[in-house]
Each structure stands twice: as structure tokens, then as C-alpha cells.
Image: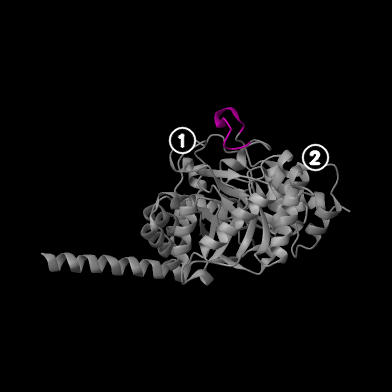
Amino acid sequence: MKKLSIIVFALLAMVGCSKKAEQQNLMKYRPLGVTGIEVSEIGIGCGAFEKFDTAQAREYMSLAMDSGVNYIDIYDANPTVRTNIGYALRGRRDRMNIQGHIGVIWKDGQYSKTRDVEESRLGFEDLLARLETDHIEVGMIHITDSWEQWEEIQGSEYLEYVKQLKAEGKIKHIGLSSHNAEVALAAVKSGLVEVLMFSLNPAFDRLPSGVNPWDADFASKSMEGVDPVRIELYDYCTTHNIAIVNMKSFAGGRLLDATKSPLGVALTPVQCLAYVLAKPCVACALTGANTCEELQQALDYVTATDDDKNYSKVLDRHDGQKAEQCNYCGHCAPCKAKIDIAEVNRLLDEYEAQGCEGVSPELQARYDVLEHKASECQKCGECVGRCPFSVNIIERMAKAAAVFEHK
């Protein structure tokens, strides 16, 4: 009996190793904007490490890295969390890109946010020491969720300290984290930010601009269509090659439970990740999985079928889902005329969001560089049949041609 148990355990271990090897081989990597770094589509956050001892931290990190994950966000200032992550990375630091936050400290036994330079310095040096490294790849200007917080940073000693860290090579690139689309848009347009950490998912995308998703009473808000400020943000990041590292891919787990989901329907982790990664501006989608089992559910995205990833079949059951709202998912492709339908729709949406008061030079220039124009549409209707959101693409192409090709 004992021998049988050993054999069964060995077989299960072999299956687990085989699955991780398959996921590592199939894991896709995307450019982290202009940084020159290639990052795995799936990344990990540090929230789970609050619950782990040293051995569990090593097991969790091994599952992630053996499956091809090479990106981690570390916002937590908890000394135990940082020490355990450092131990889990020991001997393989060069295989992991680290995104750490500047302006987080451990004070009176709990996490605290600060813009004080000396406190920020002590917190950052503690991070490097506990991770057993002399640098991190991305240094995040920590949570900036209001105009007041964004304005507070401008010209501050704190910002000069962040720039100094980059000049010294202790951070390779500057990032900023935010849940506010308007602030995030201002940040990426400032020229300061190379990587944006942002909260993107099917629920948050449908909230009005300026609403903090964690304070929102979803039931009282309009959930019809993607917020136009978010559309502009995603479009700006795409066209200016600014990478988004996504947080809250599952809306704090609420999207996985129909009783808690703001949309009234539940999605799978794979469907949530598919929604996020359909955005060309997203380089990496972080998962906040609390256990190895939950992490594995997220990693299953790598080997999932197109049907498994099809989030539209669930969103279609959400009464608030606005019909004929392009989500730029690309399911309409391929086009016989080789039109980039998603990009044409994106430009048309941005034109309409600006009030249809004439095409701006920037929008026109972005349309003019498209190899195939909307007027080349053959009206075959094949794209319409493939669209998961019932967009009247033929009508949209005609409208885009009238807007951008009318001289």
C-alpha cells in the first residue's frame, strides 16, 4: 500500500511538472512599452504572500516561474512579505522583472503611504535589501488616485527622488499606479511615465470617469458601454507605446462570483484575463491569486481554448451591456479588404467622444497612416457575424469613411 501511494504521488508530480512545462512553452511575452523588456502576459501580485510562510512563498513563486511568469508587482511594505519574496527569488533573480513601489513604508505594524523623501528612501532601501538585489526594473510612483495627489507630486522633492533613483540605476524605468482614468491619462501624457499600473476589467471599464471603483455603488451607476475617458487612455497608451500593467483583473474577485459581480454574472479567471489582454496597450495582467490552486486557475489561460476565453458569451447576458459597443477585441478579423476594423472603430469612437466637432490633426494623422481605409469595405458581412458585441461594422466603416476621408 505504501509503495502504491509513493507511485501515485510520483505520477501526480510528473503530471504537474508536465503541465508547468507546457505552460512555460506556451506562455506569450509582450514588450513592456518602450522599456525594451519582454514580460509574460500573466504576472503576479504580492497580496498572497501576506498569508505565506517561507516555504509556501517558495512554492508559489516556483509555480509561477516554472510556468513562464517573469513579472511581479511588490507594493507591500511588510518586512516578512518582502523577506519571503527575496528568499523565493534567491538564485533566480535574473529571471524575474520586479515592479516595486516608492513611497510605501511599514509603520506601527502596518502598511503606510508617504511622499516624504526620507521615509520613501528608507522604505525603498529596505525593499532592495530584503529582495537581495541592487535594483528593480520598474519603480512605481505609488497610488495616485486624485487630481490633488497628482498635483502634489508635480515639482516635489519626492518626484526628484524618484528621478534620482533612475539616474543611479536603482530603478530602470519610472511607472505610476492609479485607479482613476482621468489622472492616469494626465500622467501618461506628462511624458514622465513609462509604465502605467491601472485597474482594467469589464466592470470598472463601464464606470463613469472619476468614480473610484472601490467606493462605487455599482447598482446606482450607468454600466452601459466603456467609459470614453478609458477609451482615450487605452488609445493613447497604444499609440504612444506606454505599457499598462493591469491590476484588479478580477475586480478583487467579485467578477468570479455572480452574487458579488457588479455585472450580475460571473466570469472565469480565464475570461477576465482574456478581456484584459485583448487590449493592445496591456503588456501584463497581474493575478491576485491567494493560493497555488487559484494561481493555477489563472495560469490555465495559457493553455485555454478560444471558447474558454470567450468572455462575450457571459457579458451578453449582462443587461447593462450596451449593444453595438466595440471593445476592440479583434474577433471580427480577418477582413477580406485587410482593414484594421478595431483600429478604425477606436478612432471613430475617439472622434465621437470629442463631440464630433471636426477631426483633430492627431486623429486624422493616425487614420491616414492606416494601410487600408474604411472606404475599402466590401460589405460582405463576415465580420458582423463574428462580432461578439453585435456591432454594425458595415455601418461603422461607412461612417468612418465619411468622417476621415471626406476632403
Q: Is residue 254 magenta?
A: no
Disc 2 packing (10 Å; few <14; some 14–19; many ≥20): few
In the image shown, does 58 or 407 lie closer to the viewer? 58
Label 2 secondary element: loop
Left or right placement of residue 373 versus residue 30 in this view = right
Tag shown at residue 260? 1
Whether label 1 touches label 2, CB < 8 Å:
no
Q: Earlier in the sequence, mark 1 or mark 2?
A: 1
**Residue at (73%, 65%) from the top-left corner?**
167
- Which quarter of the figure has residue 15? bottom left
Left or right placement of residue 174 versus residue 254 in this view = right
Q: Residue 388's spot in the image, x, y percent?
A: 55, 48
Number of marks: 2
Whether residue 224 can be seen here = yes
Q: Work out which quarter of the rendered image holds the N terminus and state it.
A: bottom left
In the image shown, does 304 or 184 lie closer to the viewer? 184
Structure colour scheme? one colour
Q: Which residue is mark 2?
A: 355
Disc 1 packing (10 Å; few <14; some 14–19; many ≥20): few
Left or right placement of residue 100 versus residue 365 in this view = left
In the displayed structure, would residue 107 be above or below residue 173?
above
In the image shown, does 224 or 38 lie closer to the viewer? 38
> Three-letter amino acid code at disc 2?
Gly
The residue range painted magenta reads: 212-222
> Three-letter amino acid code at disc 1?
Lys
In the displayed structure, would residue 361 be above or below residue 152?
below
